[in-house]
Image (cartoon, grey):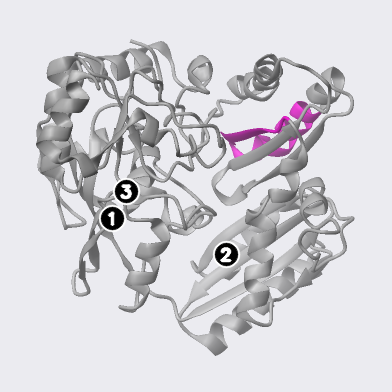
Amino acid sequence: MSNIVGQLAQQLGTDLVLSSEQAGARARNYWDTSPLESLALVRPRTTEEVSLIMQACNAAGQSVVVHGGLTGVCDADRSTSQDLVVSFERMNKIEEIDTVGRTVTVQAGCTLHALQLAVEKQGLYFPLDLGARSSCTLGGNVATNAGGTNVIRFGMMRAQVLGLEAVLPDGTVISSMNRMLKNNTGYDIKQLFIGTEGTLGLVTRMVLALKERSTTTNTVLVAVDEGAQLPGLLKLMDRLLGGTLSSFEAMWGDYFSAVTAPGWHSAPLQRNHSFYVVIEAQGASQQDDERTFNSAIEQAFAAGMIVDAVFPKSGAEREHIWAIREDFAALRQHKPLFLYDVSLPLKDMLAYVEEVTANLKQVWPHSRFYALGHIGDGNLHFFIAPEIESSDTALLHAACDAMVYRPLHRIHGAVSAEHGIGLEKKAWMSISRNRAEIDLMRLLKRALDPNNILNPGKVFDI
């Protein structure tokens, strides 16, 4: 056992410190079932214990990698046998729900779904939502500035965070647990830790804003045969639904066909359309909202924007529609399969997808391309399968990255919309950020982590 591991075991207790062998019984993350590599894995219970860990690691020059729910897709959680892993699995409490101020104070290891259920019992609503809700943690949501399916109405995770507590690489505790929507006193310190992927500090606790729970939810799955209709359909829904539109989730036809193939999800609509969109609105008047929602869909039909639609008649049918959008298990039969998360102006979206598809077919004629995304906020997700035999998956991945990312530069798109950079997208940062921006990021990193011990090598190199 190394000196730092022995020291932490003595200070925290052996039950909080797992050896490299014990940690190796765990999978690396949700996507990779190979054994977790680490020097050791530490499971603090309080901010004070996180501070103690970081003080010891900073003094020893020991690198630290942070673990939340391990559902990230960009290798920000990747550790080696030389890294100490800090897991927030034991800091999972909901400390307080303030029903008057409509805030919740919660620890970083609490899962998104646990929070959603707890506040719902109080008649309140936490609007962030994504497919990994049952396993992703709120600390990870903060670290990656998570998005999801409700961004069009409620914004990303950044918009939900009122205050937070974080531990700097040297162990200093920054407690900025603001509970107010408005606090314009000096720098907004919490922003240093939102979306920075655990490179500047370890978020331990946070204060999140809540909303009143909607009493109505109206959902429809529609079919669209012309991609050019999608922007107009979005504008029409946003205008006719009077601010209640919460989701506008598009699926290209190949994606819908794949996830509704025999043996997977049953298809509520015919599987030969070019596009499918899940449209959802949340409101407060059952009769009025349903009438307004149905009228909006009827007007979209009359305008020729949609060609078919299905309205769920129960909660189970609504969940089935959302499962088609969120459950891509059918695609995982492709080996290898590369996942992408990009952002770009809505006006450029269709042409960009066509360009990427053409590039793929030119290089890999039998490749499979599956697209879906949060069209309302300009975020697309791709699943790409080269469908060629090769022993060098890394080489295939690099070639695929080039075909996806290079066209974004011309249209001022982003190589990451909500999943972060981690290790996987470091080489493509210059597509979305200029030299001055990246230099400023490095300046902040050097100022807060001069020994470069916290998630070293993630996002960019020093």
Percent from the top left, x then y, of residue 372?
68, 46
- State the residue position of label 1: 92
**Residue appearing at x 58%, y 51% in the figure:** 376
Quick check: 267 left or right of 394? right
Badge 3 vs badge 1, beta-carbon distance below 8 Å: yes
341 inside magenta stretch: yes
Tell me which label, 2 or 3, sits earlier in the chain.
3
What is the number of the mark on residue 239? 2
Look at the image and give the residue range highlighted in magenta.
Answer: 336-357
Q: Residues within 10 Å of mark 3 (few under 14, many from 20)?
A: many
Q: Position of residue 245 (x, y in %)?
A: 54, 65
Classed neighbour count for the residue bearing mark 2: other residues with Cα under 10 Å, few (<14), some (14–19), many (≥20): few
Check the image and report above or below for 209 versus 457.
below
Point out the frontmost of discs 1 and 2.
1
Instruction: Identify which amino acid the numbered label 2 is placed on.
Output: Arg
Q: Amino acid at mark 1?
A: Asn
Q: Position of residue 273 (x, y in %)?
A: 86, 55
**Residue of label 3:** 89
